[in-house]
Amino acid sequence: MPTVPPQHEMIIPTKPSVPIMYSFVESPQQLQGSKALVIFCSGLCDPMNVWLPTLAAIARKRKQKPLLPMLLYDRFGSGATGPDPTDKGKGAKDTHDVMDSVHDLRELLICIAQRHLAVLPTEIDALRLVFVAHSMGAIIAELYAKTYPRTVAALLVLDGAPTNSDGQNWYPDPDTLDFSPAALPEGVTAELLRRARKQQRASVYNPNSVNGEQLRWSNVSDYIPIVGAPKLEGPTDGTPLLTVMAHDPVPFAKQVKKVSRSIVNHTKLAMWGIGISTSKD
């Protein structure tokens, strides 16, 4: 299996002016008649190349063992794929949203399946999908499974983006009337909380901020009003299999720039499954 697969272009019918760039990893060992596909779905603004170390690790571990075919792709506005042509002339609040990305993926899969797997468009729902999805990609994968039920057999969610918060609400608001400075853990001050909330408001990972992908996700709650509901329907009983991996608090604290580690470690980020740490640095 090549660890750096070549990139190709695919035109989807509804947006023919901008090709979607993708890589497809063939599976010569796959059993005949087995129609399944692994889809790597990247985070916001991330190119498909972020998955290359993962492919290398799979190649080392699996060696000659059978593998499912794998698809990597760049959404419109990310990596080597140009901007979404429907965004031209629109303001930031009117660009394509996450459901548009789901429909784009559906069209892409129909084309990919026909080109590489000999699956006809009329048979696309028989193709069993396995999503490996990070951050924003996890929202798109979840919405795909809900929009096209009984097609997704498994999801591996890596640090999925929250769908019910703008980020700043992870941190207590020190300017509310009921705020109590005495309740703060040691090392956390009201000013640090203000700084953290301000940073999150300005971050491209805030759903109300403009991002390079021009992907609008401030309306995610319209599509997922209740976290975890409705229950996903897979192709067989007990599916889709779901595995969720969240940030470990210690590396997360190191990765968050310009915010005191004490805030990150002490604040309970329930949406990302991060508990409270006693770190004081």
Image (spheres, grey):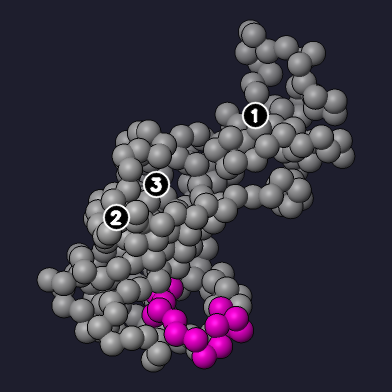
Write down the quadrant of residue 268 in the picture.
top right
Residue at image mark 1: 171
Q: Is residue 61 magenta?
A: yes
**Left or right position of 241 against 260:** left
At label 2, the amino acid type is Asp
Asked whether 78 or 5 is in front, the reply is 5
In the rendering, at what x and y percent does residue 102 appear?
31, 56
Within 10 angstroms of label 3, few (less than 14), some, or many (20 or more) residues? Answer: many
| Proximity of marks 2 and 1: CB atoms separated by less than 8 Å | no
Q: What stretch is highlighted in magenta?
A: 58-72
Residue shown at 57% from the left, 73% from the top = 54
Please, which residue is most extreme toward the left here? 122
In the rendering, at what x and y percent does residue 98 appear?
35, 50
Asked whether 104 or 63 is in front, the reply is 63
Residue shown at 40% from the left, 39% from the top = 228
Please, which residue is most extreme toward the top here? 177
In the rendering, at what x and y percent does residue 197 appear?
64, 31
At label 3, the amino acid type is Arg
Residue at image mark 2: 237
| Proximity of marks 2 and 3: CB atoms separated by less than 8 Å | no
Work out how far the residue at label 2 is from the one at label 3, CA to CA, in angstroms. Answer: 34 Å
Residue shown at 16% from the left, 72% from the top = 123
Q: Is residue 110 visible?
A: yes
In the rendering, at what x and y percent does residue 166 appear?
51, 35
Residue at image mark 3: 216
